[in-house]
Image (cartoon, grey):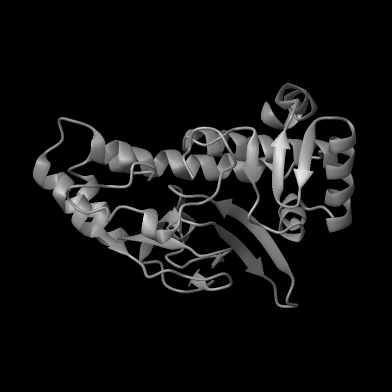
Amino acid sequence: MSPQGGVLRWPSPQDQGDGDIQRFCTTCAFGRVCLTDGYDKRALEDLHCLVEHTAPMHAGEEVFRHGEPFAAIYAVRAGMVKTRRIDEQGREQILGFFLPGELIGLNGLYTARYPCDAVALDTVTLCRFSFPQLSVLATRLPGIQETLFRLMSKDIVNAALLGGDYSADERLAAFLLNLSDRFAERGYSATRLHLMMPRSDIANYLRLAPETVSRVLRRFQDDGLIEVDKREVHLRSPERLKHLARCVLQQ
């Protein structure tokens, strides 16, 4: 579906460009680096050559697992990925959801091992970047290092948002607005969202009970803030949602 207006539906793997020397995915976190004029052309070609495209992964398959050696970071090309931890009693904790163009795996840098699992929520394709080679190339392309620092600091901010003593209404409103902003950054509608993740995953991520998420969504709909049709959510009053989530969003 065209990005202009309408509901966001993730492109299929067949819709994606190859990301070779002639074409690099414009939604990727490294897209600004690749598409900026003035860089050494050989360095840009080296960056393109680092990209290894994965075969399509299906819902439930793991990109990497907790404890595996950190060797690469991944850019989502199509689909959606969640990161999670599972404790010794088998309880799952959702850490985040990643959309096309966003990077996963950076949190493995500190310990040199991935501290979580990354799991496909639907059919997913990825670009794999060897981190040792990427680190060397960053000395020639400062934009790469800048992008990595910016993304790591963003992860810290997002983690802090979940630690506050916020109400269920505040958390869910902030969650919807965060997705809205990220969808809009990719050229899709900011008010019509397709939620690939089940509500149980949303609840887990927000540290709420699933029935609480369902109840708040119903109340938001009754109050005219949103309209829900299965996994389609239409933000009918973004300004009221922003007011509701203001204490979360100002952090």
Which quadrant of the structure image shows residue 162?
top right
Q: For residue 242, say whether it is visible.
A: yes
- Residue 23 located left or right of residue 43: right
- Residue 46 located left or right of residue 65: left
- Coordinates of residue 193 in the picture (x, y in percent): 64, 42
Residue beneath the point at 46% across and 40% down:
2
Residue beneath the point at 11% across and 41% down:
41
Image quarter where the C terminus lies is top right
Residue beneath the point at 37% across and 45% down:
28
Q: Is residue 67 above or below residue 37?
A: below
- Residue 146 located left or right of residue 165: left
- Coordinates of residue 55 in the picture (x, y in percent): 37, 70
**Which residue, as the protein is rendered here, is positioned at the far bottom?**
89
- Residue 78 located left or right of residue 49: right
Total labels drawn: 0
Residue toward you, 111 or 222: 222
- Coordinates of residue 90 in the picture (x, y in percent): 73, 76
Q: Is residue 5 above or below residue 197?
A: above
Q: For residue 167, say whether it is visible.
A: no
Residue beneath the point at 90% across and 47% down:
215
- Coordinates of residue 227 in the picture (x, y in percent): 78, 38
Q: Is residue 210 above or below residue 71?
A: above
